[in-house]
Amino acid sequence: MLHGSTITPRRHPRSHRTVRNHLYATLPALTSWARTRNSLREVTRDDVLAVLPSGGTDRSEMLSGLRSMFQVLHGRRLVFTNPTARMKVGRARNPYAGVDGRPVLRSLIDAPDPARTACGSLLIFHGLRPHQLRTLHVADIVDGRLHTDGRKILLAPQARAALNGYLAHQERQWPNSGNPHLFINLATAGRLTPVTGKWINFVLGRLRPSTA
């Protein structure tokens, strides 16, 4: 995936970030199969369906990653069949679409949780989705701009202030962490992995009205 291919099946090169995101999404499936399978050649369509989450972003991301992986392996004749063939990924529904930004913005001003403020600001001002938030790196922020998915986004002043506050909090909380991801927590501060989608959803979930 990194270098692409000029022979059949042809593929465009993919970025390190894309490859890494696919691997993170597929790791739960690969870990599960490793307990009962000796080779990915043994994986069937039923095996794929058995490990997929029931729905939402997690299902979409895992199936997308598995499809990409098996397409590469099948194209290089490293597996006999592609068990994800004709399985539709679909688009994951953004659970935060339609959230009224005005009361959210007011609540962010005095939010006691720096992670909530930073995540919420990136979602409201720049429309980042939860799976994008969890895979951002500190190095993706350069000179007041956010580099993500091949784009350079000029950060809104409020978002920039929120990120600076979060990074200062992170430095105080985990000064020796080597995790390159922008958002970390107690479980990931000593690792190199991103936070889970559930953690991001928990933080962003508090942006919804209290009756939700």
Image (cartoon, rainbow, N blue to C red):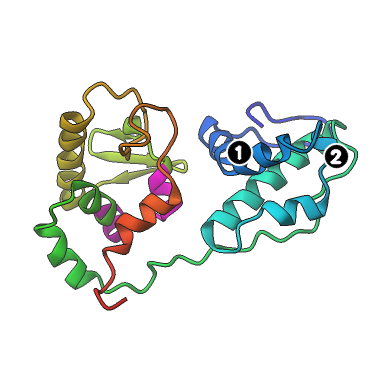
Mark 1: few/some/many CA within 10 Å (<14, 14-19, 20+): some
Instruction: Examine the structure image and report whether residue 131 is included in the region drawn in magenta.
Output: yes
Residue depicted at x 85% and y 31%: 78
Residue depicted at x 67% and y 38%: 30
x, y percent for residue 203: 30, 55
Compared with residue 173, is residue 93 higher up or lower down, i.e. above or below?
below
Q: Which mark is residue 166?
A: none
User: Which residue type carries mark 2?
Assistant: Glu
Mark closest to the chain's N terminus, 1 or 2: 1
Q: Say whether residue 37 is visible.
A: yes
Q: Say whether residue 127 is visible.
A: no
Compared with residue 142, is residue 113 higher up or lower down, i.e. above or below?
below
Residue at numbered disc 2: 42
Residue depicted at x 14% and y 64%: 107
The majority secondary structure of the magenta stretch comes to helix
Residue at numbered disc 1: 27
Q: Nearer the viewer, residue 57 or 4?
A: 57
Q: Name the side, left or right, on which 27 lies relative to 154.
A: right
Say which quadrant the N terminus sits in. Answer: top right
Q: Nearer the viewer, residue 98 or 187?
A: 187
User: Which residue type carries mark 1?
Assistant: Leu
Q: Are marks 1 and 2 in contact (CB under 8 Å)?
A: no
Q: Which residues are magenta?
A: 121-134
x, y percent for residue 80: 90, 38
Residue depicted at x 71% and y 61%: 88
Say which quadrant the C terminus sits in. Answer: bottom left
Image label count = 2
